[in-house]
Image: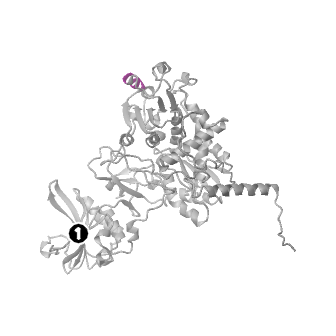
Amino acid sequence: LKPFRLKRRVSGSGRREQARSAREGAVAMAHSGPAALAGRSVQVVSDLSLEEQLYLFQRARDLKAQASGTSASDLSPAPPLCDIADADVPLKVDDADSTVYLVFMEGSTRTKESLRNAAVYHGVKVNEFSVESSSFKKSETLTDTMKMLTLYSTQRSVFVLRSHLEGCCRWLQTVMPGHAEKFGVPSPSFLNAGDGRYSHPVGELADAFSLLEHASWDRSCLHIALVGDLAHGRTAHSKVDGLAVFKQVRVDLVTPPSLAYPIEYRNRMIAQGFEVREFSSVEEYLEKSGDDLATAWYFYKPQLSRLGAMSREAAAGLTAMVSFKAEWQSRLPAGACFFQTLPRDKASPIIDLALDNTLLNGWDRHASNTYFLHVVLLAMLFGKIGYGIPVGEPVPVAKAKATPAYPPQTPQGGGLKRPVSLTAMMSSVYPFAGEVMPSTLPGFLTAVDLAGREALDRPERTRPGGAVPVRDGLVIDHIGKSSDPEQCWLRLHLVRTILNWGDRVGSEGVYAHESKDGKVFRAVMCMPNFNFETVSVPQMKTLASVAPGCTINAVRDAKVVHKFHLEVPERIYNLPNIACQNSGCVSFPDHKQRDIPPYFERVPFYETSALPNCEGFEFLFVCRYCRWPHRYEDIWKV
């Protein structure tokens, strides 16, 4: 007898599903490894490497050609922007268990509708989160809301956020992967569709695609004029990253002083090798540039409401300075093309309406391009495509300089995770107990070599009313060194409070000494009978954050046996009494996002419009979420 196997009948739809699964399995085997953007988040343009951007643009170019019934090579003889290793993988996600959430806390028509239609193309669930009827009105935090929505799908969710709060996506990408892993769902992606005054990567990526198309897909060079309100335009701020897709860039900034490009963005352009010229009006630009005019012009509608009270005449005069008249058309170079932010002001358009039906009109074509780009971008974030993209560095935000033009963006690399710092790894290490070699200490901590020194705590140096010398214990010196004694007392208070040393018996004081810059004050704290061997590396980091520049001394038998010098750490977080001073930041206390901890990163000093007349500092501290710069003393709520 021959063995037989029971066969199960499969319906027609079941056979089709099996065939689709087999095809997708074959694709996955052919393109091993994760898709580049699967589960990633995009807070700024530079969260995508140059290779990832070129892949995005080329697949959007191919999709647009396919929609017109032809191929990209038929539409343009220019070679592809990059090789597409997974060109055989279809774009469409086609998964009813995946979701796109449109979370728009500010009004939008074009961006939202383009992304909605792109999501419909993919056959995923599309949910529009209504802010007016949401839990936000019940004082729920952004984090709690996103945690809830992530679990309403068994497959990946992509959240498109537009908000008046800056840095939302940067925060969410730190907290949500762990939450998703806990409940066994794929890590969600967060896509920034405009946040406050900060950035608009979704808009800028679409702009870069249209500029490439205008340049016939030639990345070698671009000459562009940015015209209008460069102070408040989010995509204008993102241009400094978006234009880096071109190898050589010339930028003409055409704007009056009251709408000028923030100096940090201008300096970043210069640091990246862009050639930058500045003009106060369109008319001046036409007169002074002669035959050296840009072929691409991007107009930004003036947001006059942000300038405060202004007469009607003043507003009209400002608008006229950044407007283009039809009579100037003949002065433009051949092949010139205009783009502009939409919607435009029907009462006071900054591009003459007579130019709508001319070849200068690039804004209508740009609207069409946006849809194709969004289709591809969503496919990449869902992990449907994006296999085989070469691993490269993120697009550099500035060339190396002694004094950078702007702080580097926080690198992403597949989802931002909190770095495991050397301090965290040494959480149970006690330097005063001799558990660590000086060469292995974190950068903020420097051991002072006491060899050959007579490091005694001499009672005869005690001054009336001064700190009491200790025979055995801990002495912290040079606290809050400042020309203002009040700052020293504040630092003393912070040290005791934050390190929970309020119950320690001892003495403290503020003393003056003469220096080449005049009288300088510093504070000293003495704690007798303090078991200094219990002081850990994390405690020293906290002390370095609160009182950078101080020294901490271990005293035994009236002799200093160990001494460390503490410098300001590279990162300051998990401390009370610190806060970002940007009122638009998602972590700003008034927004009551209680689960978002303030987090600052130390960067070399750079010139910024956020801190006018600020100079002479070695470092600044930027908020991890909104990148707002601070002086050290400004991060403390004292």
- Residue 446 pos. (x, y %): 27, 66
Q: Identify which residue is drawn at 34% across, 73% down.
A: 536
**Residues drawn in magenta:** 282-288
Residue 227 to residue 193: above or below: above
Q: Nearer the viewer, residue 447 or 497?
A: 447
Q: Identify which residue is drawn at 46% across, 55% down.
A: 587
| Residue that extends furthest to the bottom in the rendered view of this protein | 557
The question of residue 253 being in magenta is answered with no
Give the secondary structure at mark 1.
loop
Question: Quadrant location of the C terminus?
Answer: bottom left
Residue 110 to residue 313: above or below: below
- Location of residue 271 by image quarter: top left
| Residue that extends furthest to the front in the rendered view of this protein | 1
Q: Which residue is denoted by mark 1 in the rendering?
A: 448
Residue 80 seen in the figure? yes
Q: Identify which residue is drawn at 38% across, 75% down.
A: 428
Question: Quadrant location of the N terminus?
Answer: bottom right
Q: Amino acid at mark 1?
A: Val
- Residue 388 pos. (x, y %): 55, 52
